[in-house]
Image (cartoon, grey):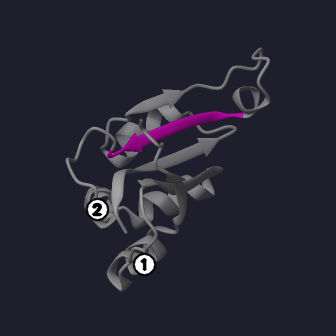
């Protein structure tokens, strides 16, 4: 697959857990954070807070495996931490953004799948065709 652009984002959402504490719990500074706002006109902002950690602008690679490995390397040894976050009412997953210009596929290795399983994280592929440029 001819991948033009890719990155992964770990998302941790909670209705009650203070997402500002996630940095200390995981030892990772978020790339973005959205704190719950009960007065927001947007339902998702009223319902909870969101903490994100992304490989966007962190790696110069168009191989999604590199981005997944980058993130999993930073989360290595965090299995109990994720158990704690999930027990505390958080929901967590990973999204892999892909912009591609051709037909084809990519591989999620068994080691990556095992690490995702150990952390209790699902991975969603968010795939877009490349924009046609004149």
In what element is the residue under mark 2?
A: loop
What main secondary structure does the magenta stretch of the protein show? strand
The earlier-in-sequence mark between 2 and 1 is 2
Task: Say above or below: 109 vs 85.
Answer: below
Residue farthest top in this picture: 39
Percent position (x, y) of residue 31? 37, 33
Task: Say above or below: 65 vs 94.
Answer: below
Specify whether residue 42 is painted magenta: no
Q: Which disc, if any, is residue 127?
A: none
Q: Quadrant of residue 16?
A: top right
From the image, state whether disc 2 or disc 1 is nearer to you.
2
- The residue at 76%/24% (across/down) is 42
CA gap, disc 2 to disc 1?
Answer: 17 Å
Is residue 108 or residue 78 the one in the foreground? 108
C-beta proximity under 8 Å, tags 2 and 1: no
Residue farthest bottom in this picture: 110
Task: Write down the residue under mark 1.
Answer: 113
Residue farthest front in this picture: 134
Percent position (x, y) of residue 1? 37, 69
- The residue at 53%/56% (across/down) is 127
Q: Quick check: 58 left or right of 31?
A: left
Percent position (x, y) of residue 30? 38, 35
- The residue at 34%/63% (across/down) is 2
Residue farthest left in this picture: 60
**Count of all numbered marks drawn on residues in the image:** 2
Q: Which residues are magenta?
A: 48-55
- The residue at 57%/36% (across/down) is 50
Specify whether residue 52 is painted magenta: yes
Task: Write down the residue under mark 2.
Answer: 63
In what element is the residue under mark 1?
A: helix
For disc 1, the neighbor class at 10 Å (few under 14, some 14 to 19, many from 20) is some
For disc 2, the neighbor class at 10 Å (few under 14, some 14 to 19, many from 20) is some
């Amino acid at each position: 697959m001819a991948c033009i652009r890719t990155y992964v984002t770990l998302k941790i959402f909670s209705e009650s857990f203070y997402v500002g504490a996630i940095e200390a719990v995981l030892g990772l500074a978020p790339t973005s954070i959205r704190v719950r706002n009960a007065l927001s006109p947007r339902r998702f902002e009223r319902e909870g807070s969101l903490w994100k950690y992304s490989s966007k602008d962190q790696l110069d690679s168009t191989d999604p495996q590199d981005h997944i490995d980058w993130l999993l390397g930073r989360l290595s040894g965090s299995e109990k931490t994720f158990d704690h976050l999930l027990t505390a009412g958080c929901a967590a997953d990973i999204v892999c953004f892909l912009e591609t210009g051709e037909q084809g596929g990519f591989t999620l290795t068994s080691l990556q799948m095992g690490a995702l399983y150990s952390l209790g994280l699902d991975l969603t592929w968010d795939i877009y065709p490349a924009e046609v440029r004149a």
